[in-house]
Image (cartoon, helix red, strand yellow):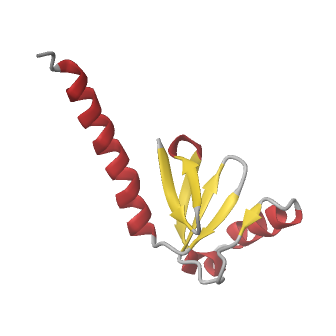
Amino acid sequence: MFIHIGDDHVIQSKDVVAIIDNSLISSSSIIEEMIHNQRKEKQVIETEDHQAKSIVITNDVIYFSPLSVYTLKKRANMMTTLNKLEDFSEESDF
């Protein structure tokens, strides 16, 4: 399934490694170093207005998202719920 993470970016949910609140960047030197290294490799996609609320880490790219961790979590859970609904709809043969 796919998750819309803001700024016209849609990613596959299976590629998501972590979703982190943007305010936690400064509290972790490991996260800061990872982002710095990925920026060197041009593997970081910033938000258009640079007002990121969360960071979405995938296997290949780090996205800065204008959406909160809570909103992204709800979107991911919504996709899981929709998958379950699709499973039930296939079982009912009329």
In which quadrant is the C terminus drawn? top left
Describe residue 43's horizontal placement relative to residue 94 as left or right.
right
Describe residue 23's horizontal placement relative to residue 39 as left or right.
left
Establish if 76 lies above or below 6: above
Quadrant hosting residue 42: bottom right
Establish if 59 lies above or below 27: above
Residue at 60% across, 60% down: 9
Describe residue 89's horizontal placement relative to residue 23 as left or right.
left
Q: Position of residue 1 (x, y in %)?
A: 47, 41
Residue at 73% across, 72% down: 32
Q: Position of residue 33 (x, y in %)?
A: 78, 68
Residue at 54% across, 75% down: 66
Q: Position of residue 31 (x, y in %)?
A: 68, 67
Residue at 21% across, 28% down: 89
Q: Nearer the viewer, residue 90 or 19?
A: 90
Quadrant hosting residue 90: top left
Establish if 36 lies above or below 49: above
Residue found at the very far right of the displayed protein: 40
Establish if 14 lies above or below 61: above
Q: Nearer the viewer, residue 28 or 76?
A: 76
Residue found at the very far left of the displayed protein: 94
Q: How many marks?
A: 0
Residue found at the very far top of the displayed protein: 93
